[in-house]
Image (tube, helix red, strand yellow):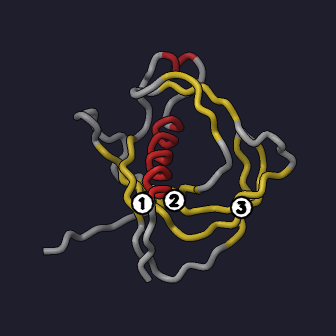
Amino acid sequence: MLRKKGLWWTVGVAAIVLALVTLAMPTGSAADKHEPMGNHYKCYQVLDWTEYEPRKVELTDQFGQSVARVLEPRSLCNPVDKNGEGIADKASHLVCYAIQDDPQGSTERVKEVEIANQFQQGPLWVGSADMLCLPSAKSYQPRG
């Protein structure tokens, strides 16, 4: 069963990459110095997958608690060497799943956060959660 995505998919993948780079940055004064930490990731659209049963999970992060329904896989993220900077952990991969998030007790729909990374420094306005990324083992054998 092949899944096709539209423009929202491209925007979503860009948001994931930005979020992953942002999450890799330390908080406080270290973020202000743009100190690199962790991997950069390049994310690929998932086109097809084996059977998967959606499930509910309880999630807690700095924005609060929620119960989310985890839907289909959306992207596979590989660690990437950006501009010859190296890869901190070559075995670290992510698989990101679409979620339907039901925040518990939070009425704040848009959150303003300050970020600092190699591409940008300043505020981001963050809306509702739409993906959950899981550390994942991955194997790959090139064809041919």
Q: Which residue is mark 2?
A: 96
Spatial CA distance of label 1 from label 2 is 6 Å
Q: Residue at x 41, y 52 (%)?
A: 92
Residue for badge 3:
68
Name the image quarter holding the N terminus. Answer: bottom left
- First of labels 1, 3 by sequence position: 3
Q: Which x, y percent locates residue 37?
A: 44, 32
Residue at 61% x, 55% y is 130
Quarter of the image where the C terminus is located: bottom left
The numbered mark, 1 or 2, whose residue comes first in the sequence reads: 1
Contact? badges 3 and 2 (CB < 8 Å) = no
Q: Nearer the viewer, residue 15 or 52?
A: 15
* Residue 118, percent from left and from top: 40, 26
Q: CA distance from mark 1 to mark 3?
A: 20 Å
Question: Crowdedness of circle 3 by 10 Å Cα count: few (<14), some, many (20+)?
Answer: many
* Cβ–Cβ under 8 Å for marks 1 and 2: yes
Rendered location of residue 106, percent (x, y)? 83, 44
Contact (Cβ within 8 Å) of mark 1 with mark 3: no
| Three-letter code, disc 1 | Leu
Residue picked out by circle 1 = 76
Label 2, secondary structure: give it. strand
- Where 90 falls versus 123 (above or below)? below
127 vs 83, left or right, is right
Q: Position of residue 14 (x, y in %)?
A: 44, 46
